[in-house]
């Protein structure tokens, strides 16, 4: 099974083709660029580049897996809308996975996975040997509650290392697209129905309709 994996929940624009063979996964093509304002311009060319690198076409893709955040509104929306549109156009299923799981799912021990939420805040979750505890949260690094985590990892952890109460990895880590596919693998292999992707924004977007004006969807 050939899977297109996408994630735009962080400053990294990411696309990959991952082959899933029973319980084995193989990364066959990958594109990433860290550009917080480049999601719209770069994601579609990255998908085309991955297909070209693997010498495949849209018809060769069997499913799509998308990170669903948490992440800033605009960037996250780009990836999820693109994933849904690709799947709909190709007539294949799409599945969502928490983007933080693509970071924390690769950890050992008790770890905090954190991404940059902007506004001097982080999106975060705690993982015990790669398994998430509870739901993702958002707060300022200085207001992080007691988690018992031994270390922190992710773009948010490296950016706010001086404000976190535990050691933080200096190198920014972004969601691992192969891990996202691995986490979706039970649904993929079972032929589960396609999903309606639900974004984890955790807070309202910065842009709001002016008071007294109807929203675009009203």
Image: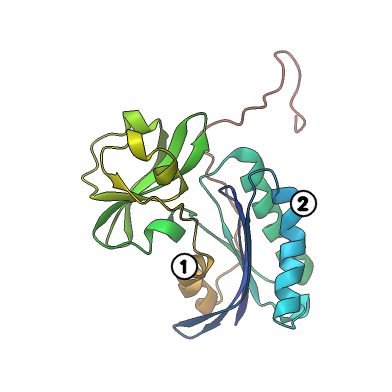
Residue 147 left/right relative to 200? left
Q: Quadrant of residue 204?
A: top right
Query: Which residue bears the numbered disc 2?
Result: 41
Q: Earlier in the sequence, mark 1 or mark 2?
A: 2
**Taking 22 as reference, is 15 above or below it?**
above
Q: Is residue 146 left or right of residue 81?
A: left
In percent of the image, x 58 and y 47: which residue is there?
11
The colour scheme used here is rainbow
Residue displayed at 65% across by 48% down: 35
What crowding class fits label 1: few (fewer than 14 Cα within 10 Å), some (14-19), or many (20 or more)? many
Q: Is residue 91 left or right of residue 111?
A: right
Mark 2 surroundings: few (<14), some (14-19) or many (≥20) residues within 10 A:
few
Q: Pointer 1: what residue?
A: 179
| Image location (x, y in percent) of residue 73 | 62, 39
User: Where is residue 127, by image quadrant?
Assistant: bottom left
User: Residue 142: which numbered mark, if any?
Assistant: none
């Amino acid at each position: 099974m050939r899977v297109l994996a996408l994630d735009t929940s962080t400053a990294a624009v990411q696309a990959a083709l991952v082959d899933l063979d029973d319980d084995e996964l193989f990364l066959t093509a990958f594109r990433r660029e860290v550009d917080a304002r480049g999601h719209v311009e770069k994601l579609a060319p990255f998908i085309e580049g991955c297909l070209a690198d693997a010498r495949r076409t849209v018809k060769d893709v069997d499913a799509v897996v998308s990170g669903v955040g948490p992440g800033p509104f605009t960037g996250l929306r780009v990836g999820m809308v693109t994933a849904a549109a690709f799947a709909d156009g190709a007539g294949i299923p799409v599945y969502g996975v928490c983007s933080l799981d693509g970071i924390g799912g690769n950890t050992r021990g008790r770890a905090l996975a954190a991404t940059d939420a902007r506004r001097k805040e982080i999106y975060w979750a705690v993982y015990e040997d790669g398994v998430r505890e509870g739901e993702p949260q958002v707060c300022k690094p200085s207001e992080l509650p007691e988690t018992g985590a031994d270390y922190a990892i992710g773009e948010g952890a490296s950016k706010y290392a001086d404000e976190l109460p535990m050691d933080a990895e200096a190198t920014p880590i972004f969601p691992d697209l192969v891990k996202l596919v691995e986490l979706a693998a039970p649904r993929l292999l079972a032929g589960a129905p396609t999903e309606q992707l639900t974004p984890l924004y955790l807070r309202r977007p910065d842009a709001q309709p002016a008071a007294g004006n109807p929203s675009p969807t009203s």
